Image: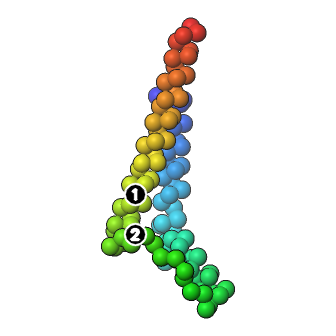
Amino acid sequence: MSNKSKLVLLLLAACLVIAVFPLLFNKESEFGGADAKASDVVSEIAPDYEVWAEPLFEPPGGETESLLFCLQAALGAGIFGYGIGILKERTKQMKKAKG
C-alpha cells in the first residue's frame, strides 16, 4: 500500500471519528436547524414581532424537507465532483501535451 493510500485511509478514519464522536458522547443534545434557533432569538429580542413573509412552498412533512435538502446536497456534490474531474483531466492532458 502506498503512502498516499495510507494517508487517504487515515484521513477518512479521522473524518469518521470527528463525525461519530459528538453523536456518541452528546446523547441528550437536540440537533435542530438554524431556522428554529433564529426564531427563538427573534422572539426573545422582539416578542411582539409579526412575520411579514410566508414561504412560497410548504413541504407536506419533515421527511420531504429532509429529502429536498439531501437532493440539494447531492446535486452540489455532483457538480463539485464534476468540476474536480474536469480540472484533473485538463491537468493530465496538459502534461501529456508537454511530455
Tag 1's secondary structure? Answer: helix
Whether 36 is drawn above or below 69: the answer is below
- At which x and y percent is residue 34? 55, 71
Residue at 56%, 86% (x, y): give it. Answer: 50
Q: Which amino acid does label 1 sit on?
A: Cys
Give the crowd class for mark 1: few <14, some 14-19, many >=20 residues within 10 Å. Answer: few
Residue 9 versus residue 33: which sits nearer the camera? 33
**Which mark sits nearer the N-terminus, 2 or 1?**
2
The amino acid sitting under disc 2 is Phe
Residue sitting at 52 percent across and 65 percent down? 22
Is 17 in front, or is 84? 84
Task: State the image quarter where residue 69 is shown.
Answer: bottom left
Query: Residue 54 — which label?
Result: none
Where residue 87 sits: x, y (%)?
Answer: 53, 29
Proximity of marks 2 and 1: CB atoms separated by less than 8 Å? no
Identified at 65% across, 87% down, the residue is 46
Q: Which residue position is annotated with label 2?
A: 57
Task: Relative to 33, say whether 89 is above or below.
Answer: above
In this figure, what is the number of numbered marks?
Answer: 2
Residue appearing at x 51%, y 34% in the figure: 84
Say whether residue 3 is visible. yes
Question: Residue 64: image x %, image y %?
Answer: 34, 66
- Looking at the figure, which quarter contains the C terminus? top right
Identify residue for label 1: 70
| Foreground label between 2 and 1 | 2
Q: Where is residue 12 in the image (x, y as percent from the top left)?
A: 49, 45
